[in-house]
Image (cartoon, rainbow, N blue to C red):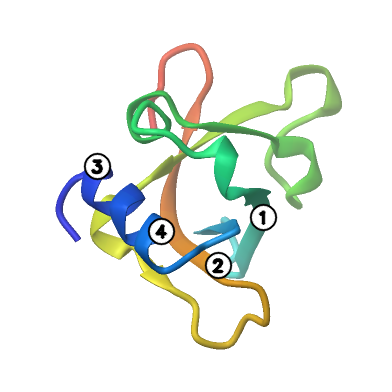
């Protein structure tokens, strides 16, 4: 998959209802959160998807826990194992203020 627009077109054509946002934590464990597909836009790929970094072991304190998941359009696929049609995206994690990974 090349561009965010192509990812959204794939999701539309395949009838995706959800997007599963995946990343690896400091310890090498896969983490994820799932959102309604309506929360994903072309801007999500450059602006990121916010989440609470304090929920990930060893990452952030509750006082400064906002983080961004930056989706990689090259990783987009429709998850064949989900009962509800779901777009899967692997992400890089970034700081909210600087977008530094």
Which residue corresponds to mark 3? 5
Sequence-wise, the earlier of marks 4 and 2 is 4
Local SS, label 4: helix
Give above or below for 89 relative to 98: below
Local SS, label 1: strand
Question: Label 3 to label 1, Cα distance in Å?
Answer: 20 Å
| Residue 66 lies in quadrant | top right
Residue sitting at 22 percent across and 51 percent down? Answer: 6
Residue 37 on image: x %, y %: 56, 48
Residue 67 on image: x %, y %: 60, 30
Residue sitting at 70 percent across and 37 percent down? Answer: 53
Sequence-wise, the earlier of marks 4 and 1 is 4
Q: Are marks 1 and 2 in contact (CB under 8 Å)?
A: yes
Sequence-wise, the earlier of marks 1 and 2 is 1
Residue sitting at 64 percent across and 59 percent down? Answer: 32
Sequence-wise, the earlier of marks 3 and 4 is 3
Residue 88 on image: x %, y %: 47, 65
Quarter of the image that includes the N terminus = bottom left
Seen as rendered, the residue at the extreme top is 97
| Mark 4 neighbour class, 10 Å CA radius: few under 14, some 14 to 19, many 20 or more | many
Sequence-wise, the earlier of marks 3 and 1 is 3
Q: Say the numbered circle drawn on residue 86.
A: 2
Q: Nearer the viewer, residue 8 or 20?
A: 8
Residue 59 on image: x %, y %: 68, 41
Residue sitting at 42 percent across and 14 percent down? Answer: 98
Question: Label 4 to label 2, Cα distance in Å?
Answer: 8 Å
User: Left or right of 12: which side holds 50?
Assistant: right
Q: Nearer the viewer, residue 91 or 42?
A: 42
Q: Say the numbered circle drawn on residue 34.
A: 1
């Amino acid at each position: 998959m090349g561009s965010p627009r192509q990812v959204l077109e794939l999701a539309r054509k395949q009838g995706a209802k959800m997007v599963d946002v995946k990343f690896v934590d400091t310890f090498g464990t896969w983490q994820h959160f799932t959102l309604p597909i309506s929360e994903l836009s072309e801007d999500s790929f450059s602006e990121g998807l916010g989440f609470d970094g304090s929920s990930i072991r060893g990452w952030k304190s509750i006082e400064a826990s906002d983080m961004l998941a930056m989706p990689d359009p090259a990783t987009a696929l429709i998850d064949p194992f989900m009962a509800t049609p779901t777009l899967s995206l692997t992400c890089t994690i970034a700081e909210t203020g600087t977008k530094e990974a």
